[in-house]
Amino acid sequence: MTCFELIFKLILCHLLGDYVLQTEFLAKTKGDNFYHLLAHCFLYAVPFYICFGFVWQLIPLISLHIIIDLLKAKKIYVFIYPKGKQKQVYVMPYWLDQLLHYLTCLLYLI
């Protein structure tokens, strides 16, 4: 398998697991219910398992997915003060959430 094919499969697995296999119910409740978050993370891992089998990379992938989604679900904010003005900034915006998930997928390249 070439590097391009591997990266394509990783992106496809991520998209299937994080979007296609996630129900609307899980998307809405995973931030408030830890069991729903675990169910989402289990479903997220299914395409990776089907595509690559049970390899060691699956364990940190699931673990890091739980941590990233927990941080996103907690809606942690920080306050920054540019030029004396108070501004509330969300620590885990959507783009950062996805970037961290894609970086986590790179574990399969190791």
Image (spheres, rainbow, N blue to C red):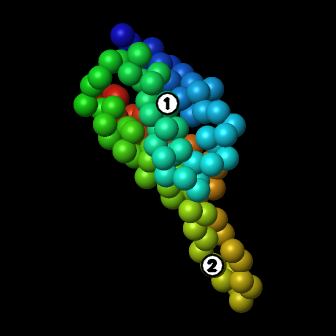
- The answer to whether residue 5 is left or right of residue 75 is left
Q: Amino acid at mark 2?
A: Phe
* Percent position of residue 19, x then y: 62, 31
Which residue occupies the foreground of this view, 83 or 95? 95
Disc marking residue 79: 2
- The answer to whether residue 84 is left or right of residue 38 is right
Which residue occupies 32% across, 18% down?
53
Q: Amino acid at mark 1?
A: Leu
Q: Which residue is mark 1?
A: 43
* Percent position of residue 107, x then y: 34, 35
Which residue occupies 30% across, 32% down?
57
> What secondary structure is marked by label 1?
helix
Which residue occupies the foreground of this view, 43 or 101? 43
Circle 1 or circle 2, nearest the eye:
1
- Ranked by sequence position, the earlier of labels 1 and 2 is 1
Which residue occupies 50% across, 19% down?
8
Residue 104 quadrant: top left
Which residue occupies 52% across, 38% down?
40
